[in-house]
Image: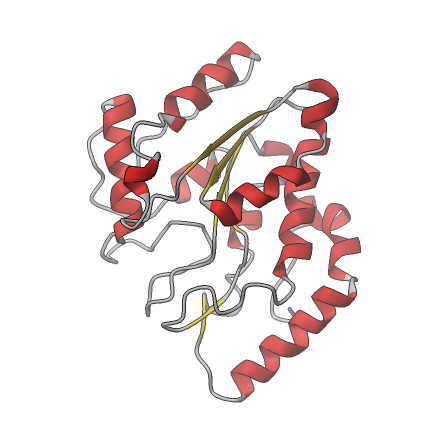
Amino acid sequence: MAAETIPESWRAALEPALASPEARKLGGWLKAEEAAGKQVYPPRGTRLAALALTPLDDVRCVILGQDPYHGAGQAHGLAFSVQDGVRVPPSLVNIYKELESDLGLPRPATGNLAKWAEQGVLLLNNTLTVEAGLAGSHAGRGWDAITDAAVAAVAERGVPTVFILWGSHAKKKASRIPALGRSHAHLVLTSAHPSPLSAHNGFFGSRPFSQTNSFLEAHGRKPIDWSV
């Protein structure tokens, strides 16, 4: 964790989690993995990019994924996103298919979702690192303490917000949305993961983008321009 800078807007919310035994153990474990020559994605210094691009007070929608892409040059700290010039991964292809079906937007040529992040869409994975070529390899290593705290911080603001949980790993985060039961201030949308292995089990046709904007507008918040 030493190479990662906690953005100022998130610092107070995340400091207790970062001081937890789980987070401290995570930092040491990651350092040891890299010292042993293992390739970890995304690169150091980009693992908290989702928090850097989307300040806590600006969050309108949270999209939760599982863990970063595990191919070379793909992950850059935003869930489901890749840098300009990188081939659009299959899960994002399916997200774009649903975007086209839901809102009629043409499928983008780029996989870079920074435009969403800059509008208040927190593109957060449940686990923020992965070993090259091994999906899920860093699950259960301590990232949950940090990402749970981030989700809870968004929910506890009491500002009507949309939480989009794709796949079983993301759905587990629903318990970290405490304001839901108290004020019903939030909209929680769950579906299958957009991966080609599961997208036909409820992701396609779920219309998360139009549902998000309808909710935001109904609660006096600015809708999101989902074009990329």
207 left or right of 36?
left
Q: In the image, is residue 7 above or below residue 221? A: below
* Residue closest to the eye, 163 or 153: 163
50 left or right of 9?
left
Q: Position of residue 196 (x, y in %)?
A: 27, 49
16 left or right of 181?
right
> Is residue 158 visible from the viewing direction of this image?
no
The residue lying furthest to the front in this view is 201
Q: Tell me which corner region of the image, top left, top right, bottom left or bottom right, holds residue 201.
A: top left
Residue located 33% across and 70% down the image: 72
Q: Quadrant of the N terminus?
A: bottom right
Q: Position of residue 67 (x, y in %)?
A: 47, 57
198 left or right of 64?
left
Q: In the image, is residue 37 above or below residue 155? A: below
Q: Position of residue 111 (x, y in %)?
A: 29, 48
Q: Identify the coloring.
A: secondary structure
Residue located 44% across and 59% down the image: 68
Q: Quadrant of the C terminus?
A: top left
Q: In the image, is residue 140 above or below residue 36? A: above
* Residue closest to the eye, 46 or 166: 166
Residue located 33% across and 66% down the image: 73
Residue located 48% across and 69% down the image: 137
> Is residue 42 visible from the viewing direction of this image?
yes
Q: Position of residue 18 (x, y in %)?
A: 74, 60
Q: Tell me which corner region of the image, top left, top right, bottom left or bottom right, holds residue 163.
A: top right
